[in-house]
Amino acid sequence: MTMPYYDSINLIERLHRQFLDVLKVELERAGILDINNVQSMILHNIGTDELTVGELTVRGYYLGSNVSYNVKKMVENGYLIQERSVHDKRSVRVKLSDKGRELNDAIACLYKKHGERLASSGLPNSRLEDLNQILCDLETFWGEQMGVGGLSLSSVKKI
């Protein structure tokens, strides 16, 4: 017996990994070897903004330590500019460099090209909008579950 909820969770995870593979292949095709697929997604999520690592973590739902490491590598490779806040010397803000903006523009073009290909392959925007609504509903459901004690873990044996 399959459970649609469980199947959906597994599919979301597989799709995310597959999309990361698509980004990796596209970066390699373009000869861009000094940034990885995850870093390119972080870069794209920064876009035109100037953010702290904490804000980036909240916005992108990345693990904090991974964001710090990836930001450090992107600064080293010239994709990001890192500056201390003039108001709070403990706070460091990042923004895209010229090199980062160029890659961000290329990623935006890739997304646009994929969107156009999706429509012609039988997956029009209307179906994607329906999918997005379902995923937003699932996100809301999971957010609500964190405040509701649905599963009693006290019955699980501790090792």
Image (cartoon, rainbow, N blue to C red):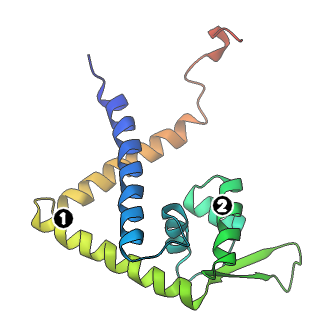
The residue lying furthest to the right in this view is 89
Front-lying residue, 55 or 136: 55
**Residue drawn where x is 33% and y is 37% of the image:** 8
Front-lying residue, 78 or 133: 78
Front-lying residue, 128 or 96: 96
**Residue drawn where x is 39% and y is 56% of the image:** 21
Per the image, the residue denoted by label 1 is: 118
Residue 134 locus on image (x, y percent): 32, 48
Answer with mark 1 or mark 2, whichever residue precedes in sequence.
2
Tag 2, which secondary structure?
Answer: helix
Q: Is residue 8 left or right of residue 159?
A: left
Quadrant of the image containing the C terminus: top right
Quadrant of the image containing the N terminus: top left
Tell me how far mark 1 sits from mark 2, CA to CA: 30 Å
Residue neighbourhood size for the residue with mark 1, other residues' Cα within 10 Å, grouped as few (<14), some (14–19), many (≥20): some
* Disc ID at residue 67: 2
Q: Amino acid at mark 1?
A: Leu
Q: Amino acid at mark 2?
A: Val
93 is higher (above) or lower (below) than 36: below
35 is higher (above) or lower (below) than 96: above
* Disc ID at residue 155: none
- Report the label total: 2
Residue 138 locus on image (x, y percent): 40, 43
48 is higher (above) or lower (below) than 13: below
Residue 139 locus on image (x, y percent): 45, 46
Residue 106 locus on image (x, y percent): 39, 81
Q: Is residue 84 left or right of residue 110?
A: right
**Residue drawn where x is 36% and y is 69% of the image:** 26
Choose top left, top right, bottom left or bottom right for residue 108: bottom left
**Residue drawn where x is 54% and y is 34% of the image:** 145
